[in-house]
Amino acid sequence: MSENTVVSLQQIENYRFDNSFAEGDYRLQSDEPAPLGAASGPSPTQLLAAAVANCLSASLLFASRKFHIDFEPLSCEANALVDRNERNRLRVQRIDVVLRAGKPVAAAANLERLLGSFEDFCTVSQSVGLGIPIHVSVLDADGTLLKQQE
């Protein structure tokens, strides 16, 4: 099955763009941070980190429901490290993602199987990860580290 995702951008002013999506009736404004833009919306880097975090969260949620392990309410934080490359150009160097279960799950049956498989089903992180290292950690509700991928 192949799928096309279409996003259209229209410049509003300076570096601010209106993003519209062919698959739905919703819009999003994006902008560059100062000094280029006015930071009036998420930056492209923030949108990239959000896409990775959202896809991993959805994959973990789907797998947790499949394995009957209650992770909800699930939360996630993504940190995209931007630094200069060898040509002195700014690039996303890595994305660190921390997923947190909303309930204690450390003793759940099949937890290792779930944690070993959910990332494989995340379209965005598996695609982005081909060019940008993505480091994923999963924590229990009490902060216990359940999985760490470096």
Image (cartoon, rainbow, N blue to C red):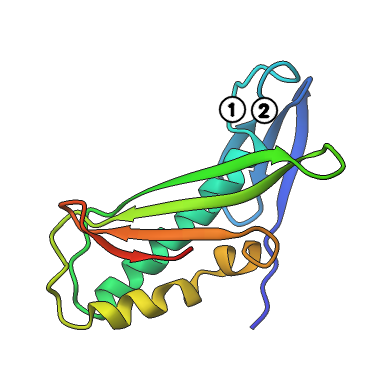
Image quadrant in which you'd find residue 40: top right
Q: Which comes before the other along the chain, label 1 or label 2?
A: 2
- In space, the residues marked 1 and 2 are separated at their CA atoms by 5 Å
Mark 1: secondary structure: loop
Above or below: residue 81 compared with residue 54: above
Mark 2: secondary structure: loop
Image quadrant in which you'd find residue 68: bottom left
Question: Where residue 9 sits: x, y (%)?
Answer: 75, 40
The residue under label 2 is which amino acid type? Asp
| Nearer-the-camera pick, 129 or 63 | 129
Is the Cβ of the residue at disc 1 closer than 8 Å to that at disc 2? yes
Image quadrant in which you'd find residue 115: bottom left
Question: Where residue 144 sits: x, y (%)?
Answer: 20, 57
Q: Residue under circle 1?
A: 41
Q: Residue at x 31, y 83 (%)?
A: 113
The residue under label 1 is which amino acid type? Gly
Q: Residues within 10 Å of mark 2 (few under 14, many from 20)?
A: many
Above or below: residue 41 compared with residue 106: above
Question: Where residue 5 sits: x, y (%)?
Answer: 67, 61
Q: Residue at x 56, y 44 (%)?
A: 80
Q: Residue at x 55, y 47 (%)?
A: 49
| Nearer-the-camera pick, 118 or 66 | 118
> Could you tell whether 63 is left or right of 97 in the image?
left
| Nearer-the-camera pick, 91 or 47 | 91
> Could you tell whether 49 is left or right of 73 in the image?
right
Q: Quadrant of the N terminus?
A: bottom right
Above or below: residue 129 compared with residue 77: below
> Could you tell whether 34 is left or right of 105 in the image?
right
Q: Residue under circle 2?
A: 31
Above or below: residue 113 compared with residue 126: below
**Labelled disc at residue 4:** none
